[in-house]
Image: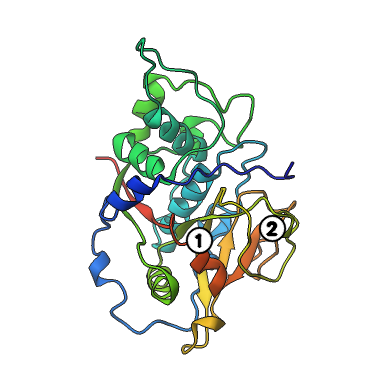
Amino acid sequence: MPRFKTGHLPDPAEVRRRRAGFHLLKGRKGLGVAPLPLKTNNRQFLPTSRGGPGILDQGQTSSCEGHAHASGITLRFAITGSAIPLVSPVCIYTCARYFARQPTPEGRFLPLTDDGTYPSMVLAGMSEWGVTSATTWGDYPADPVTINNEPTIEDLESCAEFELEGAYFLQSSGDAFCQDLMTVLAAGYPCSAAIAASSNAFQGYTGGVLGPLDDAVDHASLWIDYEWDGRNYGSLVVYGVNSWGEFQWGEADTTGIRGGMYRCNRDFVSKYSQDCAVLSVLKAAA
């Protein structure tokens, strides 16, 4: 059994075919007009002292999709200079499972289970209800004892604190995907990414640049920065943020983050391009 839990469920093929225009991000066609810089530094805003989320910890739960999106949304606001309280990762995770749940033939809804969720359901849940801060939801750090608590009407209504304004899934592959990913990171948009995380290579990662892994795609994390030589995509290095805590896993960074980050190469990001979403932009509810 892996030491750290995962919880990403890949969207079915039919959903992938139909989601190209899902919640198109306002102004996305204007991204990438200027030449791409050789490196980005969005991670300077990752520490909580800069308004970022820091390194989140999903604990022994399968709520990685909620944590990746909560981290990315909170970081996006810090990057834009309008920092907000930490967005609730369990709110996002709970609403996605609540939204995706189907009634039985008798019209009953089965209890929530902590077995992961789909990225499209995360965006659908935020579109339906919005999101709220971790303080308002009252759920962070994530607790396996309470992760399956049924949300009340008051819980769902509290999500209107922030409303979804736009998001979209990257649709390209290979070098075109690398360019698209670099374009959105250069514009200051963190990008959620579904990766293979149950292998010993990832579970035991302490530093260095990762290549593609052969295990099944099962975990959501966040890509926030890149660096390259300006000519060859083979030189591309992407900076990732994970949700297994700052002290138990990963490598440190010069921003003051003491662990929980990773780096990966062009072949790594290209392999995991199918469920890669430009992180949702939120606005404060009127």
The vertical placement of 145 against 264, above or below, is above
Per the image, the residue denoted by label 1 is 272
Residue 98 is labelled as none
Residue 22, image x, y percentages: 28, 50
When asked about the image quadrant of residue 115, the answer is top right
Residue 202 is labelled as 2
| Residue 227 placement, left or right of 246 | left
Q: CA distance from mark 2 to mark 1?
A: 14 Å
Residue 162, image x, y percentages: 34, 41
For badge 2, the amino acid type reads Phe
Question: Which one is in front, 191 or 204?
Answer: 204
Which quadrant of the figure contains the N terminus? top right
Q: Is residue 166 visible?
A: no
Secondary structure, mark 2, is: helix
For badge 1, the amino acid type reads Tyr
Give the crowd class for mark 2: few <14, some 14-19, many >=20 residues within 10 Å. Answer: some
Q: Is residue 100 visible?
A: yes
Question: Which one is in front, 233 or 150?
Answer: 233
Residue 42, image x, y percentages: 49, 68
